[in-house]
Amino acid sequence: MVGKIKYWTFIQCIIVLFLFTACARKRSNVSTGIKAVEEEPVTNSEIDEEDSISLDTINSKEADDQEINESAQNIQGVEIPVIKQKVPNQILKRYAYTLSYNKSTRCPNWVAWKLTASHTDGPYRRKDFQFHEDMDVPSPRAYYSDYSHNSLGLQRGHMCPAGDNKWSERAMDECHLLSNVCPQFGDLNGGEWKYLEEDCREWAKDYKTIYIVCGPVFYNRKHITLGEDKISVPDAFFKVILRLGKNPQALGFIYPNKDCSGGKARYVMSVDEVEKVTGMDFFSSLDDKIENEVERKSNLQLWN
């Protein structure tokens, strides 16, 4: 009897020991699993995603604030004029400018562009590019040969100048399209007109962005023509310039197509006056109050 009791006591001890060992292993596994979850590292992608959301929110707010401050100043297409007269008017959008082409005169009615400080210089030079015909306009159209060996002293006068397009190879190439060119007397092309172009680049540096429209002026009379394709020779050239910002200002100029002297102060006028001569409405997308205010003045001192 005593032997049986000892035997069963021994069996119970073994069972208890087995159960204790099993429980210990289970606890160890559970503990290890929890520890692994707690120490699992957060990936960089998760951190970046959270941070990017936060930064996007901040950047979005800053962009909204900037847009509010500049929305009235940087108006899309503010440089594009409205022609009030009934003339041929083929709109051509180029990389750096927009123009209205007149198939009757073989000249643009106007050429308009936005000039920024960053576009006032660059690696591309005029000497590396050639004038070429614009295949987008109908024949008859201007060819390089139309300007060659003329006895009048007329040159290929850029409207949107090469000096404003050094920043881009494509822009420089397109500004040499003959649809962006008018017959211009050499003394004007290399003189006062050139000086005004240089002033515009300086103003773009000073004011970050300016808007420019220029083109030929044809008075109501018969005009001489140039070359076999009979390109009309303008009587004069206009240019209007707008800057926005806290103190919007605009200037207008008309230069006769001949040797000019005396500096830009001799040829400056209000944009309103240029509109009367050209029959165009400039900067019409501006708020009427701002448009009326800037277009009635012609104060060069506000630009120097």
Image (tube, rainbow, N blue to C red):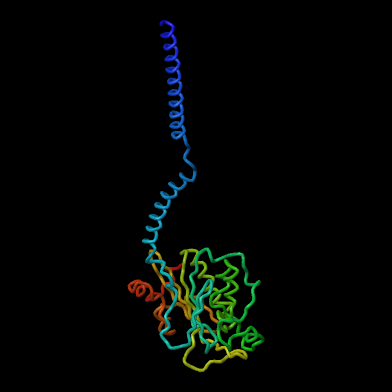
Q: Is residue 81 visible?
A: yes
Q: Is residue 275 above or below residue 250?
A: below
Residue 260: where, in percent of width, then height?
54, 81
In this image, 74 relative to 215: left or right? left
- Residue 228 in the image, given as x and y percentages of width and height: 62, 91
Question: Which residue occupies the foreground of this view, 27 or 126?
Answer: 27
Q: Nearer the viewer, residue 46 or 170?
A: 46
Seen in the picture, residue 113 relative to 61 is either above or below; the reply is: below
Q: Is residue 237 left or right of residue 250?
A: right
Residue 38 position, x and y percent, is 44, 34
Instruction: Point out the residue furthest to the top here.
Output: 2
Q: Is residue 3 above or below residue 171?
A: above
Q: Residue at x 38, y 58 (%)?
A: 64
Identified at 53% across, 73% down, the residue is: 197
Q: To which quarter of the image does residue 233 belong?
A: bottom right
Q: Residue furthest front?
A: 1
The reply, left or right, for residue 247 in relation to residue 120 is left
Total numbered labels placed on residues in the image: 0
Residue 237 visible at all: no
Q: Which corner quadrant of the image does residue 288 belong to?
A: bottom left
Residue that protrudes farthest toward the left in the picture: 289
Looking at the image, residue 127 sits to the left or right of residue 67; the answer is: right
Residue 35 locus on image (x, y percent): 45, 31
Q: Quadrant of the N terminus?
A: top left
Residues 249 and 124: in front is 124
Q: Residue at x 38, y 76 (%)?
A: 284
- Residue positioned most to the bottom: 222
The image quadrant of residue 14 is: top left
